[in-house]
Amino acid sequence: MNLAVRLRPIVFIAVLLVIWQIAISRHPGYILPSPLGVVGGIVDLLRHGLLLKYVVASLFRVTWGFVLAAVLAIPLGLTIGWYSRLEMALNPIIQILRPISPLAWIPIAILWFGVGDLSAIFLIFLACFFPLLLTAMNAVRNIPGVYINAGRNFGMGLSTLVYSVLYPAVVPQLIIGLRITLGVAWLVVVAAEMIAVDSGLGFLIVDARNAGNRYDLVVAGMLIIGIIGLLLDTAMRSLEKIKSFRWGYSED
Amino acid sequence: MSTEAVKSPIAGTKLRAEHVSMVFARDGKSTEVLNDIDLEVREGEFVCLVGPSGCGKSTLLNVMGGFLSPTSGQVRIDSQAVRGPDPRRIFVFQERGVFPWLTVEGNIGFGLFKLSRSEREQRIKHYINMVGLQGFEESYPSELSGGMKQRLEVARAFAVNPDMLYLDEPFGALDSITRLVMRGELLRIWEAERKTVIFVTHDIDEAVQLADRVVVLSARPASIQQIVNIDIAHPRDISSPRYLELRDGILRQIGFAHKI
Amino acid sequence: MNSLAEPKKWERFFWPILAFALFLALWHYSVIWSGTKVFPSPRHVEQGMVELLQKHILWNDIGDSLRRVLIGFGSAAAMGIPLGLAFGWYPAVNQVVNPVMQILRPISPIAWIPVAIIFFGIGDKAAIFLIFLGAFFPIVVACVNGVSNVPSNFRRSGRNFGLSPARILAEVVFPASLPQIIVGLRLALGIAWLVVVAAEMVAVDSGLGYLVIDARNSGKRYDLVVAAMLMIGVIGLILDLGFRRLEKIKSVRWGFRNES
């Protein structure tokens, strides 16, 4: 029973692929590639060694931008969330900067960092910074008051309070926020590469189209982007499952 | 309790559970939750199912209400086999019972969609008065206290004029004083409009205070350990010797001593 | 959270204004000290904003961006909500379709541009398609989660009172999931706003995103660039706040706790 149920999504995908394949074969000159064409594109990329190179470039930028943002935004967000006056002061500025698409920062990024890796990393940093900042702020706000009171009751000083109460209480929410933000970073890196850099999976898509309408490579690139994004998300989810973090999920 | 293969109903029998057993299977493990339950409830009776937490009393209630199918055995109401949930037997839950997006009026009127507009309004008004929620017609559940929410749920249940009421630890989330008040309220409403009531609780005092008969269930897998007739008339004096005698008898049956 | 006394009312205005003033001062003096010839100071940005408003460029671009968001987001909601409800209601369907969605979802809408151009040509329609893509998946996911998080007691009550499955979906499951759906819509709107700006930088020649790129390309007018960025931020914030208003409506408010 279990196996048949697990196969259903695969069958569904197979059906879609078949429909796609048939639809394209009916229109031979059509610009959009068929599934087989896409596979051919992937093979092509592998053979030229481009696939690995581009994947690494994209992942490299994501990692740097994401980690930098996390290292800065989380402590900052926790601090802002802790001191209500600080939050009152900074919240309006944060709320205005947040809805500005990272890509709108491209002119400034190029101004400050030129065209290249640093620009892309800056954009990803921006894309990750605000969501993580807000996640941290919210996480602090959601700490049940009883935890803090218990801590104070036991005579904990600030640093002990932070270490023994604050940190464990916010970690589950932070991990979820990190996963979602990683997804955002992956979206932005692709977009950034399409506009402002000359390597990476996003660049592949733009380049493949511009240099000869290689739509098989375009769709191949899209597919790989989707799969890697999914893998990143799955990896983060398994982090959520680690037992020592799971205490945050039982109260529901 | 003797079992007879009943084809025609015993006079006054409302519900009959015949050899009801329930086994849950999950991931290859099977857990026996109900063990050969045989029970008869008469029309208009107030029966309490009592047992330790997790013993399966809620499962039994769900089977009797038609939300679960027993692995073996059968439940009959008015001699008809129970096949699914039905408006003639309404559940009252411990929590997440009333709908938070509807007002008090909206909740009470929820099951009344078959009535005409004026009939609906009349009924709603009647039951708002009966449970004492006058003045709160347009309030939302989030604005009500715990006790008031349970009153609302009872009103909603009564409004569709069911034959039977199934209450699954309805006062469990309330503080002890509100609980006492609500028990009195429930009895008052029940005596005004007699339904057959099956009430699940883990609180023995509650059972002895409310029920005509108390069905004591063992720990899982639940089987009927004892059925006690509470022969004290309402209103019951909870310090009377007879009350204490009955209550202590049940406690002893479950295996608890007097002193803590 | 901290140990100092509760903030007073006037402080709600004092601290943000102070922070804002410090921020402007910092910005202003950084521009002076660094001797940059290109990066605008707050003054320049203000003048740039006035210039845009006077030339009516700003209003047109704002209108274009909002229009695209409206159509793209609106169609994503119109298609995504029913689909999401269906997927949530029939977990079997969700299980089949979900893997496809999980692969498509991490693909940035911008990456769809070449494909979008094939189907829609260069221009408005392609941009709207991208916005649709960006908003669609979060909405579907929110609906699926909303439906599956409906407490089982609500569904049971629906069945108990004799509602047909269609009515249960419409009158119980949908209102119960509405808070979560609204949060999903709000987030999707935020995403739509991000996507429209990005789409306008690449695929169209009007709108706020285009303004950002154009201001730089045709003359390195960074004052206009920053002015446009601020406009983007402010409008995005207004959209978000507007949506939060919806969350305060009484028949939905029960589903929300405090959030930022």
Image: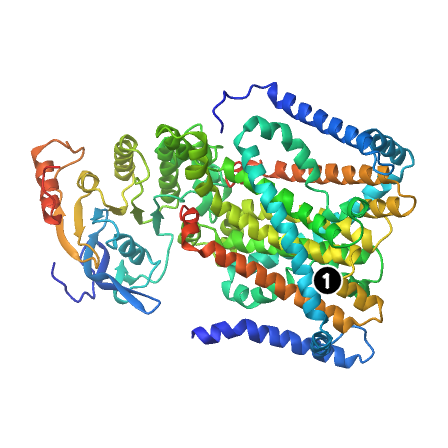
Image position of B141 with respect to B38: above or below: above
The answer to which of C138 and B59 lies nearer the viewer is: C138
Q: Quadrant of the C terminus of chain C?
A: top right
Q: In the figure, is residue A147 to the left or right of B216? A: right
Dot 1 falls on a residue whose secondary structure is loop
Q: In the rendering, at what x and y percent does residue B2 appear?
A: 11, 61
Where residue C244 sits, quadrant-wise, is top right
Q: Residues within 10 Å of mark 1 (few under 14, many from 20)?
A: many
On screen, C219 above or below B55? Answer: above
Q: Which residue is mark 1?
A: A200
Kindly indicate the quadrant of the structure image that contains residue C61: top right
Name the foreground residue: C140 vs A183: A183
Q: Position of residue C85 (x, y in %)?
A: 56, 56
Q: Is residue C248 above or below residue A220?
A: above
Residue type (three-letter) at the residue carrying disc 1: Gly
Residue displayed at 34% across by 44% down: B94
Chain letter behind tag 1: A
Way the structure is coloured: rainbow
From the viewer's side, name the closer residue of B258 and A103: A103
Point 66% across, 40% down: residue: C240
Confirm whether residue B109 shows in the render. Answer: yes
